[in-house]
Image (cartoon, rainbow, N blue to C red):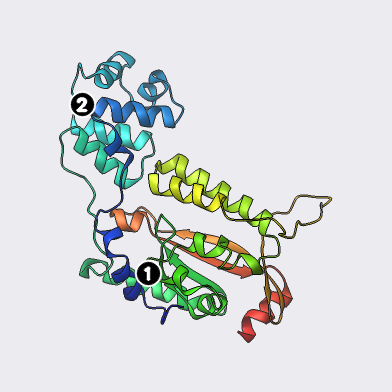
């Protein structure tokens, strides 16, 4: 069980993750052309599609991909933006073309991020009595408010030891899973989110995480009854000592980040789906 909700505690525990330790899809290929072609195909774009959006000729783009022409720094940046690459992958694409990275990657204890750390803690605290936690792009816990920590009670300590992965702690049989009444439905929701993330980032660690989560048991989980109409959101239904707590999630991201760490930092908040849940969280 985490001993506190300070952002610094988990930042220190996860220091390697914020020091450039994340592998990139770019490390799996060799040339700039290989990198560009891989991302273009992942985005399901033809050379004509990408060339048209970037305002260059298809012929020149073909020459760049095959190594017959070298791209300028501006062209690399332009192509990366049209491919909607995360900042980490934009840096990797620049490096593969022989240029310096564009975006810095600071650790969370860097003095330049002091205002960000304070803002995150303010948001987490301000959401109480609702559940809120800060995570990185691999769902590693960075910080959590008191409401979140209370709901983590009963999770096996090895699942919460830094670096604690919140998806693993949620779906592991020694985690929240035994208390999730709609476990099958929640698993489908989590897997779909991870698949979208993988599609956007090609992060090998997320691919491995998804494969691991799919091995966790789901047999015996409560299957929600069929509804006449599809729900607006997928709730998380938790069994607590006070009754069933139904929550829905909201994700908050930093606007226009210029730092890799900030680009990969998110705040996950959970709100009660009904009046009974609101009263239950207030009692917590």
Q: Nearer the viewer, residue 237 or 282?
A: 237
- Circle 1 residues within 10 Å: few <14, some 14–19, many ≥20: some
Residue farthest toward the top in the current orientation of the protein: 59
Q: Secondary structure at mark 1?
A: loop
Please, which residue is most extreme toward the right here? 228
Horizontal placement of 126 versus 249: left or right?
left
Q: Can residue 233 be seen here?
A: no
Q: Residue drawn at (43%, 31%), measured in percent from left and top?
A: 42
Residue 266 sits in quarter? bottom left
Residue bearing mark 2: 71
Asked if the residue under mark 1 is in contact with the one under mark 2, i.e. CB atoms within 8 Å, the reply is no
Q: Nearer the viewer, residue 84 or 6?
A: 6
Q: Residue 134, percent across and down?
A: 43, 66
Tell me how far mark 2 sits from mark 1, CA to CA.
42 Å
On the image, the x and y values in percent for residue 67 come to 21, 19
Tag 1 residue: 162
Please tell me whether residue 273 is drawn above or below residue 77 in the rendered image: below
- How far from the left and from the top, in percent, is residue 9? 33, 75
Q: Residues within 10 Å of mark 2 (few under 14, many from 20)?
A: many
At numbered mark 2, what does the secondary structure look like: helix, strand or loop? loop
């Amino acid at each position: 069980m985490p001993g506190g909700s300070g952002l610094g505690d988990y930042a220190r525990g996860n220091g390697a993750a914020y020091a450039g330790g994340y592998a990139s899809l770019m490390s799996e290929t060799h040339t700039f052309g290989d990198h560009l072609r891989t991302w273009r195909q992942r985005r399901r774009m033809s050379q004509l599609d990408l060339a048209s959006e970037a305002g260059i000729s298809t012929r020149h783009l073909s020459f760049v991909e095959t190594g017959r022409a070298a791209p300028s720094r501006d062209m690399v940046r332009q192509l990366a933006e049209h491919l909607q690459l995360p900042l980490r992958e934009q840096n990797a694409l620049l490096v593969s073309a022989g240029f310096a990275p564009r975006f810095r990657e600071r650790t969370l204890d860097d003095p330049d991020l002091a205002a960000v750390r304070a803002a995150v803690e303010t948001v987490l605290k301000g959401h109480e009595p609702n559940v809120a936690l800060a995570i990185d792009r691999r769902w590693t816990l960075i910080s959590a408010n008191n409401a979140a920590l209370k709901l983590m009670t009963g999770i096996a300590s090895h699942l919460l030891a830094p670096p604690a992965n919140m998806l693993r702690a949620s779906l592991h049989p020694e985690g929240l899973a035994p208390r999730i009444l709609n476990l099958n439905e929640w698993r489908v929701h989590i897997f779909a989110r991870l698949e979208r993330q993988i599609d956007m980032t090609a992060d090998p660690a997320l691919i491995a995480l998804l494969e691991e989560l799919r091995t966790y048991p789901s047999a015996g989980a409560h299957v929600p009854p069929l509804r006449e109409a599809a729900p607006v959101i997928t709730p998380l239904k938790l069994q607590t000592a006070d009754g069933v707590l139904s929550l829905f999630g909201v994700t908050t991201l930093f606007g226009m980040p210029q730092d890799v760490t900030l680009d990969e930092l998110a705040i996950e908040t959970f709100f009660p789906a009904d009046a009974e849940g609101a009263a239950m969280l207030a009692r917590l």
